[in-house]
Image: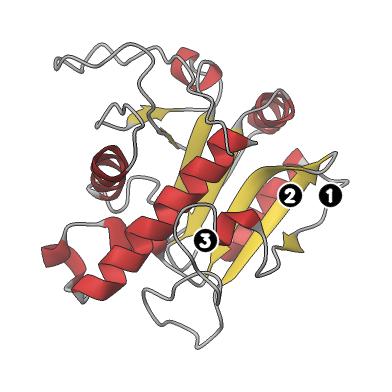
Amino acid sequence: MIFLFFIGLIFNPIFTQSVPPGAFSITRIHYGGGGDWYSDPGSLPNLLEYLGDHTNISVNPLEKRAKIGDDIFSQSSYLYLTGHGNVKFTDEESQLLRDQLLAGAFLHADDNFGMDKSFRREMKKVFPEKDWVELPLDHPIFNIYYKFPNGLPKVHEHDKKRPQALGLFNEGTLMVLYTFESDLGDGWEDSRVHNDPEEIRQSALEMGTNIILYALSR
C-alpha cells in the first residue's frame, strides 16, 4: 500500500478562493535567461483539477509561481519548470535549488521543446557530481496509479526522438524528473490551444497524476 504524504503549503495572497488546509499545489519556477517559463499557463490548473477529480488528494487548483529563493519557493515541496527557450540560474540560485532538493523537495522539469541544452547545462551547476539516469519501464512512476508499459506518452512530435524520463537521484531517491521529448505540459493545456486528440490529453493527464503520486510517496 502506498502512503501519500500531504504537505502543508503557504498560499499566495492573490488567491481569493477558499482552499482546504494542507491542500496540494505546484510551484512553477520563474527562472532567468529569457526563456518562456510561463508557457502553457492552463496546464498546471488543468492537471491539478484532474488530480482532484480522480484521486482523494485535496488540491489547491491554482498554481503558485516563484523565483528561486522567494518565500514561496522556500516553502514549496513540489516544483515545476518548463519552457521553449533559455534557462539560466545564478550561482546563488543554483545553490538554493540544490539545498531545496537535497532537503526533500521534488522538481519536475518538462521540456516544451527548446530548453534541453540550457536546462542540462544549468542542472550541471546545481549537481555537478550527478548524471542523468533514464528510468526503466518497470519504474513505479509508470504504474503507481495508471499503467504506462511503454513509458512516457508522446504528446507532440518534434525531432522524431523517443520520449525519455530522466532522473537525478540522492541516495536512491528521485529528486529531479526530466521529461524529454514528451511535451506533457502541452497535453495538459486546454484542448483548444493545441487541438490534441482527447486520448492524447487523457494520457498526458494520467502521466502527470502518476508523477505527482510518485513524488508524494517517496
Q: Secondary structure at mark 2?
A: strand
Q: Nearer the viewer, residue 52 or 16?
A: 52
Nearest to viewer (mark 2 / mark 1): 2
Question: In percent of the image, x 55 and y 84: which residue is there?
Answer: 161
Residue picked out by circle 2:
168
Question: In this picture, is 35 found above or below 195?
Answer: above
Would you identify the image quadrant in which residue 191 lies? bottom left
Q: State how far apart marks 3 and 1 are (Cα).
A: 19 Å
Position of 181 compared to 91: left or right?
left
Q: Earlier in the sequence, mark 3 or mark 2?
A: 3
Q: Earlier in the sequence, mark 3 or mark 1?
A: 3
Residue picked out by circle 3:
115
Which residue is the extreme one toward the right? 129
Question: In this picture, is 138 found above or below 61?
Answer: below
Residue 201, horizontal then vertical, whole percent: 27, 66
Asked whether disc 3 touches disc 1, contact meaning CB atoms under 8 Å apart, the reply is no
Neighbourhood count class around disc 3 (C-alpha, 10 Å): few under 14, some 14–19, many 20 upward: many
Asked whether disc 2 touches disc 1, contact meaning CB atoms under 8 Å apart, the reply is yes
Q: State how far apart marks 3 and 2 are (Cα).
A: 17 Å
Neighbourhood count class around disc 1 (C-alpha, 10 Å): few under 14, some 14–19, many 20 upward: few
Position of 14 compared to 23: left or right?
left
Which residue is the extreme one toward the left? 192
Question: In percent of the image, x 39 and y 15: which residue is there?
Answer: 22
Quadrant assignment for the C terminus: top right
Q: Nearer the viewer, residue 179 or 21?
A: 21
Q: What residue type is disc 3 on?
A: Met
Residue 17, horizontal then vertical, whole percent: 14, 17
Residue picked out by circle 1:
130
